[in-house]
Image (cartoon, rainbow, N blue to C red):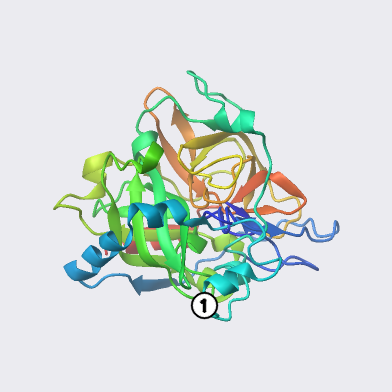
Amino acid sequence: MTLSTPLLAAAPLVAGLLGPALVGATPERHSSVVPPPPAAATRLPEAPAPADVVEHIAARGAADHLRVLSYWTPDRMDNALPIDLPGLVTEGGLLSGLTGGTGLGVAPGVTGGDVRLVPPRHGTRAEARHQSARPLAQTSGSRWAVGGAVARTTGRVFLTMNGVDFVCSASTVRSRNRDVVVTAGHCVKDGSGAWAKNWTFVPGYGTNGAKPYGQWTARRMFVAGPWSRGSDDSYDVGMVALAPSRGRHVADVVGVQDIAFNAPRGGHAIGFGYPADPPYDGRHLVYCAGRLRDDPYGDTHDQGLGCDMTAGSSGGPWLTRFDTSTGRGTITSVSSFKYSDDRRTMYGPILGEPARKLFHTAERA
């Protein structure tokens, strides 16, 4: 989820929830808000072409995994920022100060739109607390209170980027090695900048920091070349191969969602995530549901979903053919960014051939 900045946690939530430059402006991710391009730019770009896979080894052995688990104390998790934290870098360069003068000048991922600098403040407290015993076919942001598989397969991601701790969202997917989760590219790598460190996934994250199914650390990370080199929002997808926890694969503990590539455009989708900027607090699974529509500016090949989720929701799964009775569906996108003039619409990339290549590489890792 990105407001033209990834929907990670602070600014696509500060990232939560980066990409090609807009005509006359830089797009913002879910976690960041990106100024819209001139009205003339309305042509839908060609679908993303096959891209190379860029890989990063996150951990080389048991000692690395134990270090990450020890790093994430309850206090650190509580204080981690949504990738699109409001006003973090745009006003006064707060983030650069937090990173100890890394030269970022903006929140991690900002350079490519990965992290949206201006966190969305849409919605009301009432909306944030809304929950229904029956799933809604259309909602811009409601608490998921139905349970089912999605309440286990979706989780919060905790990571460190350029010395600052952030949060995002992710989901397990059906894979050969039973270790793969899908998230936003900006929740894994700051565009052409640094890779995330201390990356850990907490499925079914609950109130008061509950970890009902434990937590898994990353061993290998994968993003597409266009994201790694230029923060191209059309490629804002990341795949992470997790290490087993206590000898068990994440898929065997929480289950999985199916994933599909080159799905037809349009239709109905339901997006999930853990938004952490107001009116949300990152402690509850939230969902948006409705019809998908094309990027009105034609700046990306992404599709939009009416959604008030804020930073921290970046990387959360969008599912189609979702069965509300079982909580299972098929992932066809993830929350990536929002435009500054429309904070009520979240955009997500099409999972095409580049994403398929990422997935197959990750499931063989």
On the image, which quarter does residue 325 sit in? top left
Which residue appears farthest toward the left when viewing the image?
247
Crowdedness near tag 1: few (<14), some (14–19) or many (≥20) residues, C-alpha within 10 Å? few
**Front-lying residue, 91 or 68:** 91
Quarter of the image where the C terminus is located = bottom left
Residue at figure coordinates x 51%, y 63% from the top left? 186
Residue at figure coordinates x 40%, y 66% from the top left? 222
Which residue appears farthest toward the top when viewing the image?
133
Residue 70 position, x and y percent, is: 26, 61
Side (left or right) of 171 relative to 1 = left
Residue 359 position, x and y percent, is: 38, 58
On the image, which quarter does residue 243 sit in? bottom left
Residue 139 visible at all: no
Residue 13 visible at all: yes
Residue at figure coordinates x 70%, y 46% from the top left? 343
Residue 4 position, x and y percent, is: 65, 58
- Indicate whether 274 appears above or below 354: above
Question: Which residue in the structure is indicated by mark 1?
Answer: 100
**Front-lying residue, 290 or 142:** 142
- Indicate whether 152 appears above or below 46: above
- Indicate whether 93 appears above or below 357: below
**Front-lying residue, 159 or 240:** 159
Residue 116 position, x and y percent, is: 63, 60
Residue at figure coordinates x 38%, y 40% from the top left? 208
Instruction: Give the SS element for disc 1.
Output: loop
Count how many numbered circles sit on residues in the image: 1
Side (left or right) of 197 relative to 353 = left
Q: Amino acid at mark 1?
A: Gly
